[in-house]
RNA sequence: GGGUGAUUAGCUCAGUUGGCUAGAGCACUUCUCUUACAAAGAAGGGGUCACUGGUUCGAGUCCAGUAUCACCCACCA
């Protein structure tokens, strides 16, 4: 066996291992043989406009763990990768790039050219990002990789638009929408963020018609008064009862508008009287509709005052506001200004303040009579058709659906698929044709100059169809894999993506798009801050992989965290898992250095011989069982934790040390074999590498997940462990120098135990495992050697002879403390066992356990007391 | 305004349906380069599980309330 490096060097082996996996073809489920059942995870497509960040890495790790676990369990496993064109975000990114590199705007480039260049940019980024994804080790089938604008994927999405339109679930209408003046597009409700900011509340006096009185309204946006068409008060507000039905003169515009009453007015806020601007406020728009008020658009799509704004036309919103306040002040109509904390709507992508505008847009009716998308989704979540991890996200989702309003899906950006809607210039905008292909002629006037609707789709309209649009693009995938098994994403995508995928899935296929929906938390930096570009606190996954290895990064991303819970990531943490990977490396290095060592998939009973053998096999069995159960239960962090404890504390710290003395290479080979399999989903690179070094021909990636449990008999190996640990402890406590040899006496009445200890190698083990023991004596009865230290281990009374070197005071102190401790515990336990309520209510098993513990502790206590006497 | 999560060792966090004296990593103390590993080994110290009540034989875990922090949602003129 060739000499392996002392330190595992992931940088040198990872790329080669990934290449072997790819070449094997087993990422492609079509090449997997003898499969039983399927595991499918259509991977969330990252935005093809940048690079992978730690959030992607975190999600991919979870997906890959379940994917590899599924594959090792013999399931036809498909992880389907892809990229998203990410409409607005990509347009923003690419416009900036154009400006920075060439100093040109998209307008200068023209729509068609801009689209072409953006497409090329996305493909370039997609290529780069794919190479990053491979670095993380994701076992995805690249032959099926998709892009949201691929013709076949897009076709499915557009077909959905057509059928939804035909079913009356999509309509075009003039409604109030969120407008981003910088992006020049409408936005859906979820694309708008709300930022708390300090603002001002202006109190403006509106003169009552034919009177000297005023009605004072309060507003944060005085400039919108140019478009007021009413003043509203609450019908129960007695202050204004006599004014309802009268009119007021709108200052500056000098138009006459009515004073109306409406339930939705909060009488405790401001003056209780509200100016109504239907064209520029969502609530006002509703009220305007109900009261038949005119909509006067006085702010345009660039946030400039329109012609209807009279003398203020052409001013920006902010400038108009200042001018209006100054003019009102001159007129004596500004009563006062108060400071106010309120939230301002901003664009999710560029943070520009949103202008609510009325505009003609396309909407999805989410609660249609013939097919209520949201009710269907709520039902599926409620009845468990979609299982959600962690479970508490269920309620959040249902609440969100309950409050969901119609969804605006049209955008006025250039980057993205255009609506399959056609207009005839002669017949006008009212008559349109919905068709994926351009119709040859207008059905109304036979005109042939048809123009396509200029709107592009909301990115989420296409990506919400991802699970079936990708599967439908390849042979029988849809039949084989839909509904998919897992969908995993960051909790920030809950509403954007998860919720609406469920809706669309039910509409299109009548089924949920995925059976299990799993949310990861967000990655935070060491101070608990969200990673963000502007803060510059990001951790580049590639840099970390280069520094610590992909396996270490993967482990650091999933350990010490609960599903859906945010977790902090920092280099020191990744380092600890690099150290663990190195531990696994050295464990393997030791095994491989042994003569006649080979990995064994199975072991027969005859080969489990010594007390340590039985013990380690029993521990391994428990580990296999628990790990499997935990993964099935989606608790991967706990699963890895159990595995880690077994690997390090049981196998490395004990079994390997014993193997140096008492060889049983069959057990060694079997445990390492099983261990590599168990670790593979979590740390695929290092396990595959060791697997190969061990001479295995078949890839570990497609080897079977451990399941067979070999029955073992109980061994008393724990007694040996206790003896060793106690001796080491006593040596340290009494400051016995390293080289000094000591002797021990084992007092025990049980013949069986003594036989075990005297069986081949067991004494050797006790002597050589850092105990410095030279001589072991046995006695059936208690001996009373002067100056020795005694400790009870079950039925054994261990006597450690330090030849006069003991620190008597310290020993007395320690024993006294220990006695107190145990007495307290024994008291608590025995009073519980004497409690009739406990005895009659607690399960028999618990009672039995506690009785045993009590007996053991009482025995220990009496031994300690005797020991204390002899010391004194 | 509504909601969710968090509060456990100096720090970062686990702790599944309630069940023996609450765990890990890092940091800390002491010792050791022992031929798999100093990225390691051995032995230790360190916790009123935020607070107050309640349910229970039994509560870190369940219920109610309080406090602090974080995040999300929201048509707060």
Image (cartoon, coloured by chain):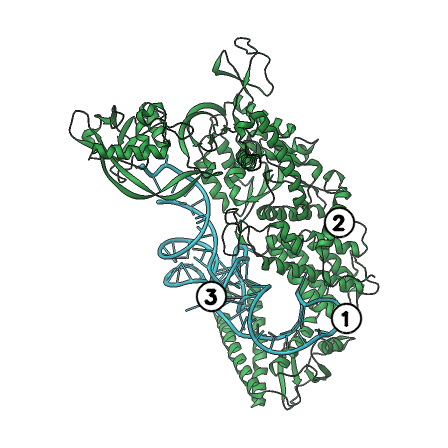
Chain colours: A green, B cyan
Q: Quadrant of the N terminus of chain A?
A: bottom right
Label 3 lies in what chain?
Answer: A
Task: State which quarter of the image contains the C terminus of chain A.
Answer: bottom right
Residue A614 image offset from top left, x and y in percent: 73, 66
Marks 1/2 same chain: yes
Asked if the residues shown at circle 1 and circle 2 are in contact, with their CB atoms under 8 angstroms apart, the answer is: no
Left of A190 or right of it: where is A716? right
Residues under labels 3 and 2: Cα distance?
A: 65 Å
* Dot 3: element: helix
Q: As drawn, is A105 to the left or to the right of A134?
A: left
Residue A621 in sight in this render: yes
- Tell whether A605 sits left or right of A63: right
For disc 2, the chain is: A
Q: Residue at x 50, y 29 (%)?
A: A409
Q: Earlier in the sequence, mark 1 or mark 2?
A: 2
Is residue A838 depicted above or below A111 in this figure? below
Disc 2: which residue: A16
Q: Between label 3 and label 2, give the one nearer the viewer.
A: 2
Give the residue drawn at x 59%, y 30%: A509
Q: Report the disc number at residue A660.
A: 1
């Amino acid at each position: 066996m060739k000499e392996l490096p002392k330190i595992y060097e992931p940088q040198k082996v990872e790329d080669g291992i990934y290449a072997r996996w790819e070449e094997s073809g087993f990422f492609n489920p079509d090449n997997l043989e003898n499969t039983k059942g399927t595991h499918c995870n259509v991977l969330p497509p990252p935005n093809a406009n940048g690079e992978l960040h730690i959030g992607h890495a975190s999600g991919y790790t979870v997906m890959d763990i379940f994917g590899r676990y599924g594959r090792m369990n013999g399931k036809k496993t498909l992880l389907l990768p892809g990229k998203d064109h990410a409409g607005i975000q990509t347009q923003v990114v690419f416009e900036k790039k154009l400006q920075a590199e060439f100093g040109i705007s998209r307008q200068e480039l023209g729509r068609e050219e801009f689209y072409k260049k953006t497409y090329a940019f996305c493909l370039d980024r997609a290529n780069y990002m794919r190479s990053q994804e491979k670095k993380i080790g994701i076992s995805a089938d690249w032959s099926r990789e998709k892009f949201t604008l691929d013709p076949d994927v897009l076709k499915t999405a557009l077909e959905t638009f057509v059928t939804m339109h035909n079913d009356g679930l999509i309509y075009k209408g003039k409604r109030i929408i969120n407008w981003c003046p910088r992006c020049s597009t409408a936005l859906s409700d979820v694309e708008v963020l709300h930022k708390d900011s300090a603002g001002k509340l202006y109190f403006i006096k509106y003169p009552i018609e034919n009177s000297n009185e005023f009605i004072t309204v309060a507003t944060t946006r005085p400039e919108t008064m140019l478009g007021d068409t009413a003043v509203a008060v609450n019908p129960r507000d007695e202050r204004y009862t006599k004014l309802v039905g009268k009119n007021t003169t709108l200052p500056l515009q000098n138009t006459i508008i009515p004073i109306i009453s409406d339930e939705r007015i909060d009488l405790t806020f401001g003056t209780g009287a509200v100016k109504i601007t239907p064209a520029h406020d969502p609530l006002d728009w509703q009220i305007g509709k109900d009261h038949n008020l005119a909509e006067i658009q006085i702010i345009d799509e660039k946030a400039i005052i329109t012609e209807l704004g009279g003398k203020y036309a052409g001013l920006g919103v902010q400038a108009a506001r200042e001018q209006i306040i100054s003019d009102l002040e001159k007129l004596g109509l500004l009563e006062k200004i108060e400071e106010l904390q309120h939230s301002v709507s901003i664009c999710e992508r560029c943070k520009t303040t949103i202008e609510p505008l009325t505009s003609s847009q396309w909407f999805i009716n989410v609660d249609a009579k013939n097919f209520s998308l949201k009710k269907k989704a709520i039902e599926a979540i409620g009845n468990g058709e979609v299982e959600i991890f962690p479970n508490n996200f269920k309620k959040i989702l249902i609440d969100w659906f309950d409050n969901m309003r119609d969804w605006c899906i049209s955008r006025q950006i250039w980057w993205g698929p255009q609506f399959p809607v056609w207009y005839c210039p002669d017949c006008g905008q009212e008559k349109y044709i919905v068709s994926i292909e351009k119709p040859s002629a207008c059905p109304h006037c036979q005109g042939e100059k048809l123009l396509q609707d200029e709107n592009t789709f909301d990115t989420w309209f296409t990506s919400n169809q991802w699970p079936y649009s990708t599967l439908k693009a390849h042979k029988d995938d849809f039949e084989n894999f839909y509904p998919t098994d897992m969908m995993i994403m960051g909790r920030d995508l809950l509403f954007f993506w998860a919720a609406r995928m469920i809706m669309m899935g039910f509409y299109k296929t009548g089924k949920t798009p995925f059976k299990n929906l799993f949310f990861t938390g967000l990655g935070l930096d060491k101070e608990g801050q969200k990673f963000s570009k502007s803060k510059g606190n990001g951790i580049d996954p590639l840099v970390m992989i280069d520094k610590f290895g992909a396996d270490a990064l993967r482990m650091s991303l999933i350990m010490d965290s609960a599903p859906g819970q945010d977790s902090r990531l920092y280099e020191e943490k990744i380092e600890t898992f690099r150290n663990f990977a190195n531990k696994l490396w050295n464990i393997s290095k030791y095994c491989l250095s042994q003569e006649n060592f080979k990995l064994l998939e199975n072991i027969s009973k005859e080969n489990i011989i010594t007390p340590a053998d039985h013990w380690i096999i029993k521990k391994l069995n428990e580990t296999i069982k628990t790990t499997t159960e935990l993964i099935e239960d989606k608790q991967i962090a706990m699963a890895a934790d159990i595995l880690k404890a077994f690997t390090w504390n049981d196998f490395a710290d004990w079994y390997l040390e014993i193997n140096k003395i008492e060889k049983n290479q069959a057990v060694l080979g079997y445990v390492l074999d099983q261990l590599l399999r168990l670790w593979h989903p979590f740390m695929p690179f290092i396990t595959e590498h060791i697997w190969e070094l061990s001479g295995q021909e078949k890839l570990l990636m497609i080897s079977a997940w451990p399941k067979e449990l070999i029955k073992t008999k109980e061994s008393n190996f724990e007694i040996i462990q206790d003896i060793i640990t106690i001796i080491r402890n006593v040596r340290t406590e009494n400051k016995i120098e390293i080289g000094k040899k000591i002797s021990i006496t084992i007092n025990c009445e049980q013949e069986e135990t003594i036989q075990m200890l005297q069986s081949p190698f067991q004494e050797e083990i006790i002597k050589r495992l850092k105990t410095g023991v030279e001589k072991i004596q046995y006695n059936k009865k208690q001996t009373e050697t002067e100056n020795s230290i005694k400790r009870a281990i079950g039925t054994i009374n261990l006597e450690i002879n330090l030849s006069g070197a003991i620190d008597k005071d310290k020993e007395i102190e320690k024993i006294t403390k220990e006695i107190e401790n145990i007495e307290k515990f024994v008291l608590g336990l025995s009073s519980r066992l004497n409690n009739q309520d406990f005895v009659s209510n607690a399960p028999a098993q618990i009672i039995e356990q506690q009785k045993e513990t009590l007996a053991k502790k009482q025995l220990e206590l009496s031994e300690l007391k005797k020991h204390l006497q002899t010391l004194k």
